[in-house]
Amino acid sequence: MLKNAIMGFVGAAAFLSAAPVAAQNITADLDQIADVLQDEGYKAKIDEGDGQRWIESAMSGYTYIILPFGCDDAGNNCKSIQFYVAFVPTNKPTLEEMNTYAAENRFGRVYLDDEGDPIIEMDLDLEAGGMSRELFLDNLAYWDTIMVAFGDFAFSKDPE
């Protein structure tokens, strides 16, 4: 009886070790995120300055950055990331137009910076184990959609 139990345990252990390894969740690790973006065919360059790191990437004709947040003092173990892009149209939207846009669009946080340039940001909480690659890519697709829509809005008053 004991021999059968041991053999069953050994067989189960062999089965578990032969099982495929679960996919690694995406966390707020910039190196990991840059690898995922590159695997998907996007540009992803890690830049550094003033003790900060970020990713510069691009899609749909726009360059944007990914910033880490909630990191420890060494800049590691970050908890979230933020997609960020600033547009510089010739004819900038007014605060009233920005407020209307924000009220009518669910995803993305929009505002005017100190120079009146329209900004859009989107945060992802990657704390507590992160998210699956599929969900991360789904959020990346959302970012692309809202970034393009906001870019169309931001440049809507510029001559073509």
Image (tube, helix red, strand yellow):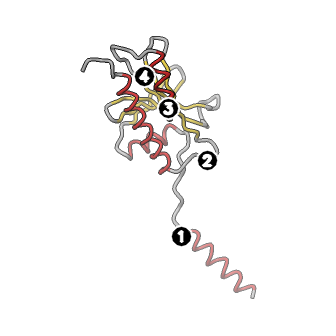
Q: Looking at the image, which is closer to me, 71 or 105?
A: 105
Q: Which residue is mark 4?
A: 86
- Write the residue at 35% across / 27% down: 152
Chain-order first, disc 2 or disc 3:
3
Q: Residue 43's x, y, as percent?
A: 36, 37
Q: Amino acid at mark 4?
A: Ala
Q: Label 3's element?
A: loop
Residue underneath mark 2: 129
The mark closer to the camera, 3 or 4, is: 3
Give the vertical position of 140 relative to 66 (above or below): below
State the residue lying farthest toward the left.
160
Q: CA distance from mark 3 to mark 4?
A: 13 Å
Question: How far is disc 2 from disc 3 in space, using C-alphas?
Answer: 23 Å
How far, Cα to Cα, is label 4 from label 1? 48 Å
Query: Which residue is denoted by mark 3 in the rendering?
Result: 108
| Residue 142 relative to residue 126: left or right | left
- Binning the other alpha carbons within 10 Å of mark 4 as few (below 14), some (14 to 19) or many (20 upward) gives many
Q: Distance of mark 1 from mark 3, alpha carbons?
A: 43 Å
Callout 2 amino acid = Gly
Rendered view: 146 above or below 87: below
Front position among marks 2 and 3 = 3
Residue at point 62%, 72% (across, down): 13
Q: Secondary structure at mark 4?
A: strand
- Spot the residue most to the top: 115
For disc 1, the marked residue is 18
Q: Residues within 10 Å of mark 1 (few under 14, many from 20)?
A: few
* Closer to the eye: label 2 or 4: 4
